[in-house]
Image: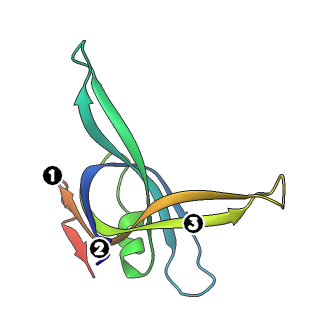
Amino acid sequence: MDINQICISGRLFDIGVNESRQTNYPVVEAKLSVLMRYDKDNNEVYDEFNVRSYGKKSTFISTLPEGVFVVITGMLTEDIRVNANDPNTTRSKTYINIDKIKTIGFGKGDYIE
């Protein structure tokens, strides 16, 4: 059995809003910064994950400020594109496609579709 569900929390940044050719709602792409551990000098070490949203919830996400703390549930997906510099090769990027999002400590509440 294959299960593709993820629940992750962190801070949203690099929020980009793009118009969709297929719907009236934008496509939002952002990064999620997640605290992973502390190093030997007690400095925070973060990982960044690419997140993407479609549909009505994208309008909600587009209003969020950089750095807002969120909890996201979604699915992992790989986006494969032809390399613009060499059409004989491809490039891939892994995203978390957002199903549900909840803001923490921010007055906007949450968006659950």
State which tag comes first along the sequence, 1 or 2. 2
Q: Position of residue 87 (x, y in %)?
A: 84, 61
**Image quadrant for the C terminus?**
bottom left
For label 2, the crowd category at 10 Å Cα-Cα, with few meaning under 14, some 14 to 19 and many 20 or more, is few
Circle 2 residue = 3
Residue occupying image coordinates x 23% and y 31%: 37
**Marks 3 and 1, how far apart at CA:** 32 Å
Determine which residue is flagged by label 1: 105
Q: Is residue 75 above or below residue 93?
A: below
Residue 95 makes an appearance in the image: yes
Residue 34 at x, y percent in the picture: 30, 43
Residue at 17% from the left image edge and 55% from the top image edge: 104
Q: Say what secondary structure mark 1 lies in.
A: loop
> Of the residues shown, which amino acid type is indicated by label 2?
Ile
Which is nearer the eye, 56 or 85? Answer: 85
- Mark toward the start of the polypeptide (3 vs 1): 3
Which amino acid type is marked by label 3? Asp
Residue located beneath label 3 in the image: 79
Q: Secondary structure at mark 2?
A: loop
For the residues labelled 3 and 1, say whether their Cβ atoms are less than 8 Å apart.
Answer: no
| Mark closest to the chain's N terminus, 2 or 3 | 2
Name the one closer to the observer, 100 or 64. 100
- The answer to whether 105 appears left or right of 113 in the picture is left
> Quarter of the image holding residue 84?
bottom right
The CA span between labels 1 and 2 is: 30 Å
Q: Position of residue 41 (x, y in %)?
A: 25, 12
The answer to whether residue 53 is left or right of residue 87 is left
**29 or 56, which lies in front?**
29
